[in-house]
Image (tube, helix red, strand yellow):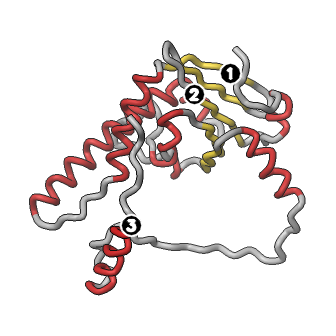
């Protein structure tokens, strides 16, 4: 089966270093496919059909994109249930999409992921490694993960990087972002303003059914 990327295999491999692996997905009605490309190899794996993968992907997406804004004991209980459900569903999705390359993940530091269908809404960095206990730490703690719409974008990024002057100094920025309007670091007035802005902006679009 031919690789779906517009670039040739040789061109793609020339963009990868020894610590980088490209994972490209193609979801199909009967079965899906995963291409794993390194700087010296190409492996193709059969995956479950689109419907099986996308139903779990939609579930994971909804759990990620619907934070609980309520307070109180009942809210804490529902949030705990949602977190437990996410742990289970994300582990299930990881096994569906990454299990064939489980050994490869142990030997590579950087993953370039080109998704398809509902997988495009999933941050692979938040998934646990395949085949691990459901409470395993997410991939982002052991890998650098780059999500791209196509392998062709990788060529453009490499081109821009090659033509960019090396900065004279290096700056490391460490941050602790706020993702919850109920974060205690936000004052009541700021929480109210943030909530108003989020309502004006509207809720994020859900994956089409």
Between 75 and 170, the residue placed more toward the observer is 75
Q: Which residue in the protein does label 3 denote?
A: 179
Q: CA distance from mark 2 to mark 1?
A: 9 Å
Quarter where residue 84 is shown? top left
Q: Which residue in the protein does label 1 denote?
A: 43
The residue at the point 36 percent across, 58 percent down is 203
* Mark 3 element type: loop
The residue at the point 85 percent across, 37 percent down is 14
First along the sequence among labels 3 and 2: 2
First along the sequence among labels 2 and 1: 1
From the top left corner, tell me how far across and down residue 107 is, in percent: 64, 36
- Badge 3: how crowded within 10 Å, few (<14), some, or many (20+)? few
Q: Which residue in the protein does label 2 denote?
A: 101
First along the sequence among labels 1 and 3: 1
Quarter where residue 38 is shown? top right
Left or right: residue 55 compared with residue 139: left
Between 50 and 103, the residue placed more toward the observer is 50
* Mark 1 element type: strand
- Badge 1: how crowded within 10 Å, few (<14), some, or many (20+)? few
Q: CA distance from mark 3 to mark 2?
A: 32 Å
Image quarter of the N terminus: top right
Figure check: 55 above or below 125:
above
Image quarter of the C terminus: top left
């Amino acid at each position: 089966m031919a690789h779906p990327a517009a670039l040739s295999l040789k061109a793609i491999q020339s963009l990868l270093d020894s610590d980088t692996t490209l994972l490209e997905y193609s979801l199909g009605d009967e079965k899906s496919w995963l291409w794993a490309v390194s700087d010296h190899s190409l492996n193709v794996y059969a995956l479950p059909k689109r419907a099986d993968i996308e139903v779990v992907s939609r579930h994971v997406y909804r759990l990620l994109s619907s934070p609980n804004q309520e307070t109180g004991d009942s809210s804490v209980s529902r949030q705990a249930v949602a977190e437990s459900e996410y742990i289970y569903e994300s582990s299930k999705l990881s096994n569906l999409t990454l299990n064939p390359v489980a050994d490869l993940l142990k030997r590579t530091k950087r993953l370039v992921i080109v998704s398809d269908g509902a997988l495009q809404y999933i941050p692979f960095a938040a998934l646990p490694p395949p085949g691990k206990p459901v409470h395993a730490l997410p991939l982002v703690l052991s890998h650098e993960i780059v999500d791209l719409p196509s392998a062709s974008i990788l060529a453009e990024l490499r081109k821009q990087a090659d033509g960019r002057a090396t900065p004279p100094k290096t700056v490391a920025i460490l941050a602790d972002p706020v993702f919850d309007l109920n974060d205690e670091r936000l004052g009541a007035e700021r929480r109210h303003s943030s909530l108003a802005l989020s309502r004006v902006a509207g809720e994020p679009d859900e994956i089409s059914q």
